[in-house]
Image (cartoon, rainbow, N blue to C red):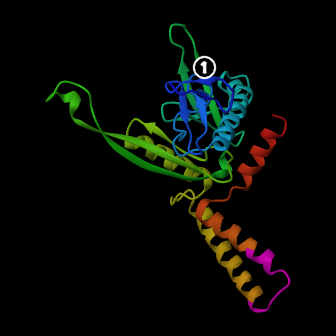
Amino acid sequence: MATQKCAICGAEINMFQQQQLADKTYVCRKICAKRAMKGFDFVGGTLPELQTHIKQVEDGTRLYEKLFLPIKKRKVPGQKLKKFANDNIVVSEDLGLIARLEVRYKIFIFGKSTLASVYRIADLYGYEHESDTQIGMGSPGSKTTAPKKVHYVHFFFWDTPGVSDFRVKVSTARGYDDIFKYFNKLFGIQKTLGNIGNTWKNQINAVKAAGSAVKAAVTKSDDLEEKAAEATQAIDRMQYGDRTEWIAKAEAALRDA
């Protein structure tokens, strides 16, 4: 039986103990592969990508324990957490951060451990509804074998080392609606009377910035590059909302973490 060496810890592993990556390297299933969160693409991922994700999880777990747990235990007056997707997504508006959690229960031993990857709210640019149809397990013809629709929210983040997009399961389609409305309101891009002023203001600013960039290009102005950058940022704010506040909060929270 052919053996390989784990590219991370160096352990000798047989074919039942090894996980092959896209770049033909191998890692051990028992220890190193388990350092990644569920959903990491081992088949399509490379060793550097796995190592980056493992560091993302190690750093995220440390940040969750240091910054989020005190709020959860109500040791930080005035701060609270918002939870979604069966408590697997935890948002702290005060920190400007989002934690994706994975709880692992220990077999034969009472207890559990929690892995986390932490993202900046400011880097969140997509949260889309997805669904799969699954066939239940059970005797033929029973209700348990009837097709069942399973709902997910697919999150996407900008400029994030490690895993920058992932899916989390929600109980119903309404679970997605709650997340969609929450983040749209958070970013001021929801089309409601409460936020229509912010949306309209961002649209006007984007038009003005784009006009300035065009004028600078026509006149060959020295500040063309600056005007173009301002136009890009204004258009982003129109589409994704103004993230200035969330950038500042995350930087403050991570500065001493």
Q: Amino acid at mark 1?
A: Ser
- The residue lying toward the viewer, choosing from 60 and 49, is 49
Question: In the rendered view, would you say 87 is above or below 159?
Answer: above
Considering the image in quadrants, where does the C terminus appear?
Answer: top right
Where disc 1 sits, the SS reads: strand
- What x and y, as percent, mark residue 7? 66, 33
- Would you identify the image quadrant in which residue 9 lies? top right
Q: Is residue 89 left or right of residue 254?
A: left
Judge whether residue 93 can be spotted in this image: no
Q: Is residue 105 left or right of residue 172?
A: right
| Picture residue at 58% right of the left edge, 42% below the top | 24
- The residue lying toward the viewer, choosing from 174 and 79, is 174
In the orientation shown, which residue stands out farthest toward the front?
A: 1
* Count of numbered circles in the view: 1
Question: Does 223 appear in magenta?
Answer: yes
- What x and y, as percent, mark residue 14? 54, 24
Residue range (magenta): 218-228
- The residue lying toward the viewer, choosing from 207 and 123, is 123
- What x and y, as percent, mark residue 233? 70, 67
| Picture residue at 22% right of the left edge, 31% below the top | 145
- What x and y, as percent, mark residue 198? 62, 62
Residue under label 1: 113
- The residue lying toward the viewer, choosing from 115 and 203, is 115
In the orientation shown, which residue stands out farthest toward the left?
A: 141
Question: In the rendered view, would you say 71 is above or below 181?
Answer: above
Question: Does 135 appear in magenta?
Answer: no
In the orientation shown, which residue stands out farthest toward the bottom?
A: 219
Question: In the rendered view, would you say 18 is above or below 110?
Answer: below
| Picture residue at 70% right of the left edge, 43% below the top | 96
| Picture residue at 65% right of the left edge, 47% below the top | 121
Judge whether residue 71 can be spotted in this image: yes
